[in-house]
Amino acid sequence: MREHHDFSDSIENPYLKDLKKSITIRLGIDVVKYFKTMAKETGIPYQSLINLYLRDCVQHERKLELKWGS
């Protein structure tokens, strides 16, 4: 393996901006605490865990069943 790699002629990945989108989202304190605790246990950043969980929901087309009141 080389000791030094020359990246001076490299270009930025043109698809990088399509991989993730920065947004602002308001989450419950309990939700953030849950994922931060899981992050400590797994060593995976809590934002990544939230993204992985949501991606799993998308891939399995999970739907919420909401019932308001009795």
Image: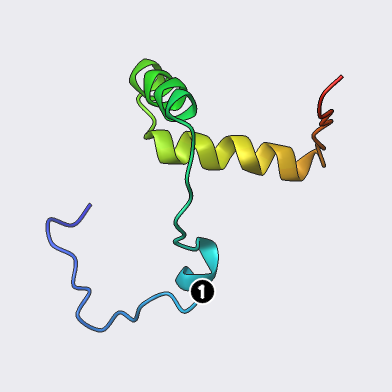
The residue to which callout 1 is attached is: 15
The scheme the figure's colours follow is rainbow
Q: Nearer the viewer, residue 24 or 51?
A: 24
Give whichever of 39, 31 is nearer the camera: 31
Which is nearer the eye, 24 or 70? 70
Locate residue 59, reporting x and y percent: 76, 43
Residue 63 image point, x, y percent: 82, 37
Total number of numbered labels?
1
* Label 1 packing within 10 angstroms: few (<14), some (14-19), many (20+): few
Q: Is residue 7 above or below residue 26?
A: below
Taking the image as shown, residue 8 lies to the left or right of residue 15, namely left
Tell me which amino acid carries mark 1. Tyr
Q: Residue at x 40, y 33 (%)?
A: 46
Residue at 19%, 65% in the rendered image: 5
Residue 1 in the image: above or below residue 45: below
Badge 1 element: loop
Image position of 29 with respect to 21: above or below? above
62 vs 58: above or below: above
Quarter occupied by residue 36: top left
Kindly give the residue lying farthest to the left in the view shown: 3
Instruction: Give the residue at the far top of this rendering.
Output: 41
Please provide percent x and percent y for residue 67.
Answer: 84, 28
What residue is at 44 percent from the left and 56 percent from the top? 24
**Left-right relation of 52 to 27:** right
Quadrant that contains the C terminus:
top right
- Residue lying farthest to the front in this orientation: 70
- At 39% from the left edge and 30% from the top edge, which residue is drawn? 44
**Nearer to me, 48 or 16:** 48
Residue 65 on image: x %, y %: 84, 30
